Amino acid sequence: MQTAHMKHGIVAYFDILGYKTFACVESDEDILRNARLVSERLLEIRKRISERFAEYAPLFIRDLEWCILSDTILVWFEIPKREFEVEVVYWHMFLRVCNDLLQVMFNDRVPLRAGESEGGFSVEDHCFIGRPIMQCEHWANQTEWSGCILTKRARTKLEALCSTPGADDDRKLMEQVCVNYPVPWKEAASAAQ
């Protein structure tokens, strides 16, 4: 029996838009065609993204972890406590990976919506537990778009990292990957805002 391990870091939850329609096919040829597309596009995505970053961020990519389960892609990076002073660099790399993931999948005609957060969580095999993951899933599923939303927790953390004295370069890094955008909400979510 495996023992659960706590992780502390950044996490993103991606959901494939329209997956139920894609997966709800009946004929043998449709099932096999869609299974082949899943194998080519979804199951190979970690390798494809890793290749894009391998040259200039090999250590980051090596420690980036993934879990793919049906229409869900969970990506996380555990931030070593001893490296707090470079935490903003990890955030920048993580956000760039997530941005590339959205772009590559969109270009493959597999649009994603996502949420990103930070904090403590546990992932073992295909089981994941923790408030940051559940917040990512909740907020991603409230949107009506192909894009990524930062949870309040993640936004607060990034603002704190980028507002310290001497953080001008950090702020510029984050402006490369984070854009304020009026998020299109599902009706129930917009009423709750």
Image (cartoon, grey):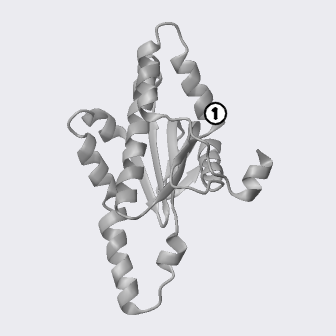
Q: Position of residue 122 (x, y in %)?
A: 55, 45
User: Which residue is situated farthest in the right direction here?
Assistant: 191
Q: Nearer the viewer, residue 41 or 64?
A: 41
Question: How many numbered discs sit on the rendered protein?
Answer: 1
- Classify 10 Å Cα crowding around label 1: few (below 14), some (14-19), many (20 and above): some
* Above/below status of 109 relative to 183: below
Viewer-proximal residue among 162 and 85: 162
Residue sticking out furthest to the left: 55
**Residue located beneath label 1 in the image:** 153
Q: From the viewer's perspective, is residue 39 above or below residue 30?
A: above
Quadrant of image for the C terminus? top right
Residue at 41% x, 44% y is: 99
Instruction: Name the residue rendered at 28%, 33% in the picture.
Output: 59
Q: State the image coordinates of residue 5 (x, y, percent, origin top left).
A: 52, 42
Considering every residue shown, the one lying at the far top of the view is 165
Camera sees residue 3: no
Does 181 sit left or right of 80 as displayed?
A: right
Which residue is the extreme one toward the bottom?
Answer: 27
158 sits left or right of 67 in the view:
right
- Disc 1 marks which amino acid? Arg
Q: Residue at 65% across / 35% down in the picture?
A: 152
Q: Is residue 149 above or below residue 8?
A: below
Above or below, 121 against 67 in this view is above
Residue 63, image x and y in percent? Answer: 35, 38
